[in-house]
Image (cartoon, rainbow, N blue to C red):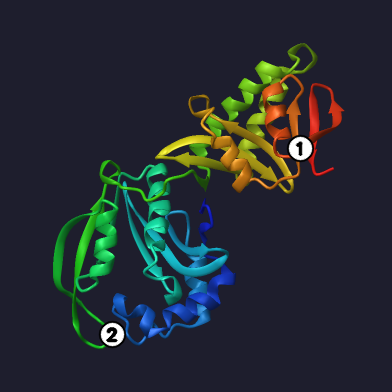
Amino acid sequence: MYIQYHNYIIRNATEKDVDNLVLWWNDGAVMEHAGFPNGLQITKEKVKEQLENHDDQNQRLIMEYDGIAIGEMCYTHLGDSVDIGIKICNFDYQNQGHGRIFLSMLIERLFQKGYQKIVLDTMVENKRAQHVYESLGFVKQGVKIDCWKDQVGNMRSAVDYSLVLESFHSFLTDVMISDIDEKDCDCIYQEMRNLVYAYEDLLTIDVEYVMNWMYKKVHNHKEWYKKVIYQHDVVGYYAINDDELEDFYILDAYRGQGIGTKIMEEYIHSNTLCVFKKNERAIAFYQRFGFEIVEEMNTRYIMKKGR
């Protein structure tokens, strides 16, 4: 999973995060609210093993702010529901509103993935967390009294919460970038087809071959693609391969609202792209961001930035 919102990033935890996770999980001050005031006393080898066992339905995530890892999240598949957790482990970033942003990002993405309900729990005494969850629209489902014994033998009680899309209050006020799902591939392919039929010289190409090539491109290179989400809706897609902007689409219903400009200014840093000669609107758009035509290629131009 990869999600970006301005300078906030949520990504899958990898082996490079092991040292941070060991540090956080063994810190009693960090883990106290989870019932482990002495820390987990876990080894690097055990953390590596846990990360290796994660998959798309059971994932450990890292929260980054301004390029700094400040905490971790997780989610576990439960049929049409998903259980989530969050922990801001760097105390310098607590009580600043970051948790609401990160939770909004993850919740938005999970609803996009098709989950119908999001659930979580927290300790009864953790009033700060309960306030955050309720501000996002989570509804208290009940309290489990003395449901488990913590690390030092104290009985602990937990509050259960659940959230459905209709009750979700997001703290995101702008577009969010996310990885794509298989179901996005058909939409991207349709945008590709639309461009070809609008701007390509169909008499000089093998249309069936081109369409098949485009279909394979998006399905075989999903890692290139990102989708743009705004207020629960997918509003566009783009693909970056190394330094080249491969594709960029804002869906018809969302054009003319400045979304493309936001994406170019904040998320796309490519220096090369290819555009149809007949697509004058796109050419003018890219020229606004410093791209210039440097080469002519049949029905397309190659444009580069900063010549």
217 and 192: which is toward the camera: 192
* Residue 126 lies in quadrant: bottom left
- The reply, left or right, for residue 75 in relation to residue 146 is right
Provide the residue designation for mark 2: 151
* Residue occupying image coordinates x 70% and y 34%: 286
Residue 243 is situated, as x and y percent measured from the top left of the image, at: 74, 47
Q: Amino acid at mark 1?
A: Phe
Residue 66 is situated, as x and y percent measured from the top left of the image, at: 55, 63
Mark 1 to mark 2 CA distance (whole Å)? 59 Å
Around disc 1, counting alpha carbons within 10 Å, would you say few (fewer than 14), some (14 to 19), or many (20 or more)?
many
Provide the residue designation for mark 1: 291
* Residue occupying image coordinates x 65% and y 22%: 195
Farthest residue, direction front? 288
* Residue occupying image coordinates x 14% and y 65%: 143
- How many labels sit on residues? 2
* Residue 203 lies in quadrant: top right
